[in-house]
């Protein structure tokens, strides 16, 4: 007898095979049978007219803190995600000796746009080492499967404390301790190592995140400490580091690097720049060296206020003021000399910065005062031209008039469907960078997979449904070495998404106040989703999360060697 039978769905298996109408049976969390299934005793879901695919595999999330108080991993599990990789960019919360915990979360609150009081209130610190953290996840499983990256910045902080963001060169003893922590994390089930060299990654008070100042030799030593050749992946916010700088490390250690960087997102100001990075990675893959690019399928957009102006934080004028309270910021923003510094920054941005001085990409999204409603849905350059003012002054004066509560929307990168489509289709690309769990004040891209199915499959037709599903499921799972996920075949884990291809998508952004301590965040809701199943257990029924005494997600700690190199390209 089966535990569950999903009847009559159009099966898209995630492996690239043609769709077919079939029943799918589940037993003990796995796909047990596919075909015409006559078991009348099993729980049955009538899926006629719907598509059944594997659940979405999201390899770039930041649920490290949220998972300690929210096993549902909302909103991702309602948005079709059944497997999440956490610890990206090297910003996890373990190992965390008691004396460094508040430092870790202060930095996390700024670099990943999280509510600091929610972190302080919500995190349950019943772990210290990486192994302790994995044990905690096993005791309190989530509604999705979770794989965890060891974090370069977190490990550097555990060893060096505040000096991790102040001193580039670790001592030989400190490096030895870091290497031991990486080796321990891999032994305890880490999927790999996360790191960052992004110019946009600053912590509390404007300090650089620890890994961003570390020499590449330190990263090389930590990658070498991961264990046998070919074991584990490197997920790196690579900033301005080039494929040419990363390939020797990938070749030396036989481990694939997955880069996430604004440099490799489509930018109409430099339309060929990202493609050159993708092509360089493809050349490395043909040489047998694993270099891939994580590419978002949505514009890199940020909702922000000047009280939390994350898109501007890589500009030096903001270095001393990132952690200021709103009343302190108001004094800063009124200061003509500070405005002059920021104006100079905006005129000469460095490659890799989110904001490139392009005021025509910054819109007034919402105002607090009725008298300012005339500015809503207008871009700053347009307002400035009409009023014969500087766009920076327009933004700051408007924000100051509303106690820094004016909402702005910046659409900075990955804007332009034709240019983005070339990158999404590229053999070196991996559809990712949802940042789910992070930047909650500004945005929510956790529904990237449903957006992909709506926009790039249904509306534009850049991918057919078969290939679109594959790119969200088995493709990332196989590249990351995650076994038995991202496919519907007999014996695979029954991670499933049931949806209507005619209506699947995501809602507009919505702000809710449901974080610990009443903190606010931005979420999206699914459309056209009729069921999400993790290891054969329904976690979302199309309208609500399904309550379970014990969450069905697994802590993933056993991985295949990455496909890497030429074989991965050939398989595509």
Image (spheres, rainbow, N blue to C red):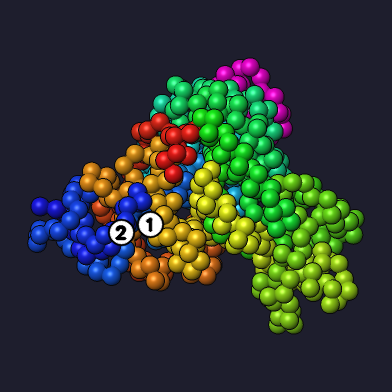
Say which residue appears at 35% left-offset and 68% top-offset. Answer: 500
Using the numbered discs, state the Cα–Cα distance from disc 2 to disc 1 in whole angstroms: 7 Å
Q: Please, is residue 13 above or below residue 388 in the view?
A: above
Report if the CB atoms under discs 2 and 1 are less than 8 Å apart.
yes
Q: Look at 76% across and 60% down and name the residue there.
A: 358
Q: Is residue 72 left or right of residue 514?
A: left
- Magenta range is 159-178
Instruction: Say above or below: 155 vs 204.
Output: above
Residue 181 in magenta stretch? no
Residue 43 left/right relative to 530: left
Q: Nearer the viewer, residue 421 or 223?
A: 421
Q: Position of residue 423 (x, y in %)?
A: 57, 51
Occupied quadrant, residue 90: top right
**Helix, strand or loop for disc 2:** loop
Helix, strand or loop for the magenta stretch, by majority? helix
The residue labelled by disc 2 is 19
Residue 114 or 188: which is nearer the viewer? 188
* Residue topped by disc 1: 466
> Image point 72% across, 32% down: which residue?
166
């Amino acid at each position: 007898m089966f535990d569950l039978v999903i009847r009559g769905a159009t099966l898209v298996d995630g492996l690239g095979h043609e769709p077919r109408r079939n029943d799918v049976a589940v037993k003990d969390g796995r796909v047990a049978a596919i075909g015409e299934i006559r078991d009348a005793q099993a729980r049955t879901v009538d899926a006629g007219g719907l598509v059944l695919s594997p659940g979405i595999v999201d390899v770039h999330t930041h649920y490290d803190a949220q998972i300690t108080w929210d096993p549902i991993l909302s909103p991702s599990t309602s948005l079709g995600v059944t497997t999440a990789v956490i610890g990206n960019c090297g910003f996890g919360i373990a190992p965390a000796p008691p004396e460094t915990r508040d430092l870790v979360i202060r930095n996390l609150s700024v670099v990943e746009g999280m509510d600091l009081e929610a972190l302080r209130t919500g995190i349950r610190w019943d772990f210290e080492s990486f192994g302790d953290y994995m044990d905690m996840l096993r005791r309190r499983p989530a509604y999705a499967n979770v794989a965890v990256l060891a974090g370069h910045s977190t490990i550097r902080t555990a060893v060096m404390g505040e000096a991790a963001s102040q001193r580039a060169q670790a001592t030989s003893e400190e490096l030895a301790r870091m290497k031991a922590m990486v080796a321990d994390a891999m032994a305890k089930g880490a999927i790999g190592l996360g790191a960052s060299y992004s110019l946009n990654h600053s912590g509390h008070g404007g300090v650089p995140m620890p890994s961003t100042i570390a020499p590449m030799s330190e990263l090389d030593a930590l990658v070498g400490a991961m264990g046998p050749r070919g074991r584990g992946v490197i997920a790196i916010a690579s900033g301005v580091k080039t494929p040419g700088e990363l390939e020797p490390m990938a070749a030396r250690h036989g481990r694939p690097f997955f880069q996430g960087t604004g440099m490799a997102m489509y930018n109409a100001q430099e339309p060929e720049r990202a493609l050159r990075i993708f092509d360089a990675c493809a050349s490395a893959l043909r040489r047998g060296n694993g270099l891939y690019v994580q590419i978002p399928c949505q514009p890199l957009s940020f909702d922000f206020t000047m009280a939390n102006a994350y898109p501007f934080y890589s500009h030096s004028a903001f270095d001393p003021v990132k952690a200021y309270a709103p009343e302190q910021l108001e004094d800063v923003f009124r200061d003509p000399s500070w405005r002059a510094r920021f104006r100079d920054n905006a005129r000469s941005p460095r490659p890799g910065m989110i904001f490139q001085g392009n005021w025509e990409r910054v819109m007034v999204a919402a105002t607090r005062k009725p008298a300012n409603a005339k500015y809503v849905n207008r871009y700053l350059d347009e307002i400035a031209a009409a009023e014969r003012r500087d766009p920076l002054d327009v933004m700051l004066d408007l924000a100051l008039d509303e106690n820094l509560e004016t909402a702005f929307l910046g659409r900075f990168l990955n804007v332009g469907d034709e240019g983005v489509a070339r990158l999404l289709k590229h053999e070196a690309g991996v559809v990712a960078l949802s940042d789910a769990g992070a930047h909650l004040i500004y945005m929510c891209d956790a529904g990237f997979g449903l957006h992909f199915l709506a926009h790039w499959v249904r509306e534009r037709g850049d991918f057919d449904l078969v290939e679109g599903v594959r790119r969200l499921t088995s493709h990332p799972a196989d590249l990351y070495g995650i076994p038995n996920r991202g496919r519907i075949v007999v014996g695979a884990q029954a991670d499933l998404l049931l949806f209507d291809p005619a209506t699947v998508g995501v809602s507009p952004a919505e702000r809710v106040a449901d974080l610990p301590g009443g903190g606010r965040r931005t979420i999206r809701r699914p459309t056209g989703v009729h069921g999400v199943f993790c290891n054969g257990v329904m976690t979302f029924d199309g309208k609500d999360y399904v309550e379970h005494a014990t969450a069905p997600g697994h802590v993933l700690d056993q991985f295949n060697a990455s496909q890497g190199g030429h074989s991965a390209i050939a398989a595509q």
